Each structure stands twice: as structure tokens, then as C-alpha cells.
Image: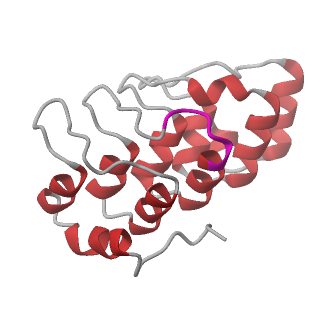
Amino acid sequence: HYAAKHGSTNVLNFLFQSNLTVYETDIHGNTIAHEASEYNQIDSIKLIWKMHQNLFKKKNHFGRTPIHTAALFGSSKVLHYLLELNIIDIDQPDNDGCTMAHLAASRGHGECFSCLIIHGAQLDIYTFDRHDSVMDVAKRSGKYGRIEKARSGTLRCNSFK
């Protein structure tokens, strides 16, 4: 996990070659792909994708894949890269019914939110517990202004070309 989190691709390569701890999870059920996604470690993500693509469909204890993790933590380079691979449904909810768009909106990650919209994320999906839309989550979290800029196109995904 440390190697993925800190972008140590040489260490990751060694682990992959020896099959050591590749599938281990932390106390929250996060894999090395989740860790690399959280810390926007694009080189680690590319290496993990090359060697163990199945890790990108693994859910942690919150029902979140590494792509959800990238959206939640504002890891725009990783998010864009993984969305381009079309690994999972962009509107796949976590255990609470939050999609990647809900997660990005909850923390005001406008670049990630823009990237999700460009890739076709729906904004009219509601969470299981509070029945909040994506924009409801942005309002409640105090991040509506930044998310509205991303929705309207004035704030864009830095990774989109």
C-alpha cells in the first residue's frame, strides 16, 4: 500500500513479480489501486492497470471502487485516466447510493466533477439515505458555487483534451 500511495513504481514492480501483497486490503477494504487513486499517483495506476486490471472493480467496505476514490479525493488525473478505460458504469453507486458525481460534489472537486460530466455522469440520481441529487449534495456541503461552475463549463477537467 505504501508503494502505491507514494508512487514507488519500482517497488510495485517487485511486488507484482513476486505476487506479494498485491491483493491485500487495509482496514477499510482498500486495495493498492484505491491507495494510488486517493493520492493521484498516475504512474502507479498505469502500472497496476497493466498488471492487475481486476483490482479496479474491487469495492472497499463503503462499496467504492478505486474510481470512486479518485472522485472523492479530487484525483483528477487518475479519474480521467480510469474513466477513459470505461471500467465500470460511471453512475455506479456506493453503499449509500452516492455516485462518483455525488462524491466529487460533496468535497467541491470541480475539475473531477467536470470530468465526470464530460464522460456522461447523470446528475439526477438520488442517494439512498437522504434522497439527495448531486446538486443537493453540493449545496448541503457548501460547495455549490464551484460545482455549478464545473456544471456550466466555466471550470473544466484539466486532464481533458
Question: Whole-percent x and y of residue 26?
Answer: 50, 25
On screen, residue 1 versus residue 60, left or right, reads right
Q: Residue at x 48, y 24 (%)?
A: 59
Height in image: 61 above or below 80?
Answer: above
Say if 19 sits above or below 130 in the image: above
Which segment did they paint magenta? 84-89
Q: Nearer the viewer, residue 72 or 23?
A: 72
Who's the residue at 85% across and 43% down the image?
Answer: 10
- The magenta stretch spans residue 24: no
Residue 57, picture quadrant: top right
Q: Main secondary structure of the magenta part?
A: loop
Q: Residue at x 30, y 25 (%)?
A: 95
Q: How is the image coloured?
A: secondary structure
Residue drawn 25% across the image and 47% down it: 124
- Name the one closer to the observer, 111 or 4: 111
Residue 153, image x, y percentages: 41, 76
Residue 54, position as x, y percentages in the image: 67, 23
As displayed, is residue 33 above or below residue 7? above
Relative side of 33 to 94, left or right: right
Instruction: Tell me where residue 79 appears, x and y as whole percent.
Output: 56, 52
In the rendered view of the protein, which quadrant contains the C terminus? Answer: bottom right
